[in-house]
Amino acid sequence: MKLRMVVTATVLLGSAAGLGMTASAAAATGTTGAATPSAASEPSISIRAIDREGKQVAVTASLQSPVVSPTGIDDTLTNSGATRVPKGTYNIAAWVQEPGSGAQTLVDRELVVTKSETVVFDARKGRPVRFTVNDPTATVQAVEAEPYSPQGWEAFDGYGAPVPGPTYIVPGKMAPGYILFLEAELTRPTTNVSPVDYVLIRQLGGTIPASLTFSDNKAKLANDHVTVRSIDPGGFDGVFFQAQPADTFGILPSGAATQQGTTPFSVNFHFTPGYEWQSSTLSGTDNTNNLPVFGEHSYSQTFNNAVFGPSPQFGPMVNGNEVEPSTLPWGDYLLDDPTQGLAGSFGLQPASSQAWLYRGSKLLAHSRNGGFAAKISATPAWYTMKVSDAAAGTGAGLFTSETLSYNFRAWAGDSNLSVTNFWPLITPSGLNWLNAAKQGTKTTVRVYFKDLESDSDPASNMTAHSVKVWASANGGKTWTAVRVTESGPHWSAVVTNPAKAGHVSLRVQGTDSSGFTASVTVSNAYAVS
């Protein structure tokens, strides 16, 4: 199933909302909303449009000054009346729709305003946009065309062509500094989840040429083999890719290539080289470490692994003379995929959450579905924070619950506690696309530990000691200690899987150099089938 990213909006004359922005968003980006006349003598701009059949049609246009601040103008014009604007140079752009045909034509041009005039958007001058690749099984599913300014403005605030259908663009001179961003997605249209997805980009500056046909050679593109595993039986998920500037500066319009369907599935994405690609899934797992891609190179990513561990950004902190969780993002915060770097959470949709704080055996605070704040002494003492989530649903899938426990030393005014948080991460290896091991086999479970310093680098881990691993084949009713071996900052344990179908639950514990101990218990960590 394909998602078409399109923009539809009710356009208000002279309103930032007409460009898909709220008033607060417009203020945040430095836009001024409507062009406000400073005097009645300012020239006025009227617009009208002619479609490809020569008929006059309604039109809405974007008018922007190449200079964003301090006097930038980001205005919306309609053909219902004239709008006064200061004299100067602008970029003016509009989509001319073809009633009943589904086609559209982009007209984008430099407009030098010295006197009142009428701007005519003539779609008959448009040239077809064509993207091709030497793969006869793939056809164009979507084309995004977006004029934008590297200073921070997009003509239509994202997602290019308003409706599906053939796309045309009128050649001509753009405003100073403006760039026309083109992105096409080519897939196999007869499959639910296309096994191939070509994401092809062109950027044109200065002048839009008469020829808008772009050809790519598959062998010269970058390839990323993406696998989306299954967490729940019959689960549905999707994977998205968005291009980022390779130099990490500036902006790009926010189009996205998409594949989604019933998990598990895999897709070979082929990208125009020279960009970085932000990937994410519907279930929330993000690769915030952008993937730099190079032509003729191959990469791979797997989402929804049976890989578990809370982010070390979560844990206890001291606020004055109270201990509280640094963040308690009740919801889907417990299961991060560390192979993706600073990943988003996924998988566990809790029906209930609880948190406790102890000093020794004394309960200081308890909460349900929320946080707490408990007073502590001014002298150092040992405390235990425990957080537990139970998942919603029938429990047929993975991650039916997870419990975190942190034993730490703290005192009133201890501002360093939150940055010393760390958590063990657990990676069962050799599982299939359904995150399942075969009955009666052995599964190696890799364990390593992350703190805030190492969390941003998937290849970097912190050192822990006194590492212990337990496994359960009956949902945590009984636990069996598993022998652990150490190799630098990595630990591993070999779990004997049950001889019948079911799940294996895991518990891992480790201690850092200061004596802080962190543990994670995952019910239904992986399946056995």
Image: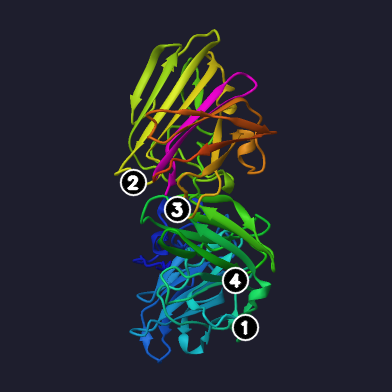
Q: Position of residue 198 (x, y in %)?
A: 55, 71
- For marks 4 and 1, the one nearer the N-term is 4
Please report the bounds of the magenta region as a residue range. Answer: 502-529
Residue assigned mark 4 = 201
Number of other residues with Cα within 10 Å of mark 4, as a class: few under 14, some 14 to 19, many 20 or more: many
- For marks 2 and 1, the one nearer the N-term is 1
Query: Viewer-proximal residue, 522 or 279?
Result: 522
Q: Nearer the viewer, mark 2 or mark 1?
A: 2
Question: Dividing the image into 4 quarters, which one contains the N terminus?
Answer: bottom left
Query: Viewer-proximal residue, 12 or 157?
Result: 157
Q: Position of residue 338 (x, y in %)?
A: 56, 43
Residue assigned mark 3 = 434
Secondary structure of the residue carrying numbered label 3 = loop
Residue 19 versus residue 414 in the image, above or below: below
Residue assigned mark 2 = 396
Secondary structure of the residue carrying numbered label 4 = strand
Given the image, on which type of amino acid does mark 3 rest? Leu
Residue 298 versus residue 456 in the image, above or below: below
Mark 4 and mark 2: span between their CA atoms?
42 Å
- For marks 2 and 3, the one nearer the N-term is 2
Query: Viewer-proximal residue, 308 or 483?
Result: 483
Residue assigned mark 1 = 209
Q: Position of residue 459 (x, y in %)?
A: 66, 43
Splitting the image into 4 quarters, where does residue 238 fall? bottom left
Given the image, on which type of amino acid does mark 1 rest? Pro
Given the image, on which type of amino acid does mark 4 rest? Ile
- For marks 3 and 1, the one nearer the N-term is 1
* Residue at the left extreme of this rendering: 394
